Image (cartoon, helix red, strand yellow):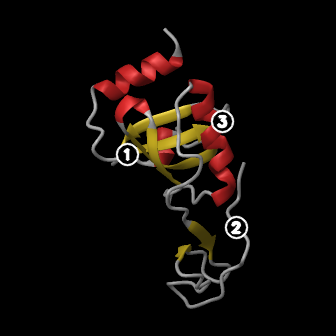
Amino acid sequence: MDTATVLREWLAGRDRAEPFTFVVALDGRLRLAPRRSEHVALAGGRDVLAAGEMGFGAGWRVTEVTNQSTGYCPAPDCWDAVAGALDRLGISHPGGFADTIVFRRCPACGERNIVRDGDFTCALCGGALPEQWNFATG
């Protein structure tokens, strides 16, 4: 049985009313779990190419994808890994993130931050956040 068929069968037994947690592993494979699952646990604690939430609609089409993962804080450019994983499975998708979250780590206190409205200020200590994504990979 091919991977796309396995995915469809897995999804058939799940409530698709809310998004699923996903990661794209370093080998490019898509992994899904119920929304309340932790991204890092889904990836077995390993590094990933992308992480976030994914919603499915009728016809197994991916209707919405975000990079919302405070475990990995993925950069917005991780979309290419998501699209590649879905394309290899033959699953149509929206072509980009519905909501792109901008994450930054505060160099002063180390806190993970979500940048809102272009305000690059740490929510914990008030320090300046860098303009460039600054979470280590690999």
The kind of residue tagged 1 is: Ser
16 left or right, relative to 64: left
Q: Residue at x 35, y 34 (%)?
A: 58
Q: Closer to the camera: disc 3 or disc 1?
A: 3
The alpha-carbon separation of the residues under discs 3 and 1 comes to: 23 Å
Callout 3 amino acid? Gly
How far apart, in angstroms, are the residues tagged by discs 1 and 2?
A: 25 Å
- Would you call the spot at circle 1 few (<14 residues within 10 Å), some (14-19), or many (20 or more)? few
Residue 75 shows in the view? no
Q: Amino acid type of disc 2?
A: Trp
Q: Secondary structure at mark 2?
A: loop
Find residue 113 and report its horizontal and vertical position in percent. 54, 74
**Would residue 1 be found to the left or right of residue 24 on screen?**
left
> Which tag is nearer the camera, tag 3 or tag 2?
3
Spatial separation of the CA atoms under disc 3 and disc 2: 22 Å
Q: Position of residue 7 (x, y in %)?
A: 44, 24
Instruction: Tell me which numbered mark, 3 or 1, is placed earlier along the sequence.
Output: 1
Circle 1 residue: 37
- Please name which of the two marks, 1 or 2, marks the residue nearer to the observer: 2
Q: Which residue is mark 3?
A: 84
Q: Which residue is mark 2?
A: 133
Where residue 61 appears, x then y in whole percent? 44, 35
The disc, 3 or 2, on the residue closer to the chain's N-terminal end is: 3
